[in-house]
Amino acid sequence: MFALEFAGHAGPVPGSPTERRARTSASSQAWHTSLGPDGVEARLDPLAGGRAVLESRVERFGDGTFTEDGTIQYGGAGSIAFITVGRGTVGLSPIDGRQVGGVIWAVTGGDGRFAGARGVITSNFTVDSEGRVVDHHIARLYLPT
């Protein structure tokens, strides 16, 4: 199980009213969370190491839902492939000019160190009016022994 913050861009595919492409990346990082009487404190620290790159195809529907499929390359270790479980959702954010959404992906396989991978990734994201994406992943992957 691990968490990563991805950032990048998503935008429409020319000629398609519903299809979008996304490309985001995440550097090696450490998450810190502390619960206290004043609330939750969270911090993300960059670490030396590799970079993960997500590339996906998104199909949006008029009701604010979407499906997505793609790959995530985890540095030189290998990659995983994923598809949406059901549909994700995206809608208005409390911050003007942004949308907020979430989706669950089923990991359908992989290569390299991730050959035969299965599991689930949750994605909680924001996207602004210029297509800039910030996407937080929690991944639980199962690898064959």
Image (spheres, rainbow, N blue to C red):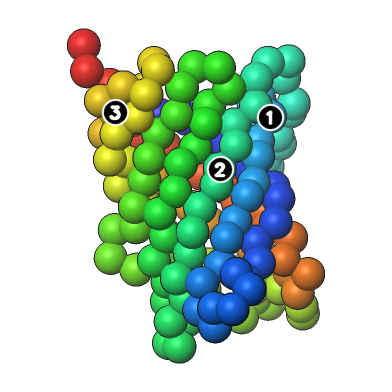
Residue 36 position in % (x across, y down):
62, 41
Give the image location of residue 57, x and y in percent: 49, 59
Separation of marks 1 and 3 at Cα, in angstroms: 21 Å
Closest to the observer: 94 or 121? 121
- Asked if the residues shown at circle 2 and circle 3 are in contact, with their CB atoms under 8 angstroms apart, the answer is no
Q: Which mark is residue 27?
A: 1
> In this rendering, does residue 138 appear at all?
no
4 to 45, vertically: above or below: below
Q: Nearer the viewer, residue 110 or 126?
A: 110
Identify the residue shown where x is 59% and y is 78%: 15
Q: Taking 89 as reference, is 35 left or right?
A: right
| Tally of numbered tags | 3
Mark 2 touches mark 1? (CB < 8 Å): no
Give the amino acid at mark 2: Leu
Which element type, helix, strand or loop, lies under badge 1?
A: strand
Q: Where does the image place residue 130, in percent across and percent down from the top left?
A: 78, 69
Q: Which mark is residue 117?
A: 3
Q: Quadrant of the C terminus?
A: top left
Residue 54's label in the rendered image is 2
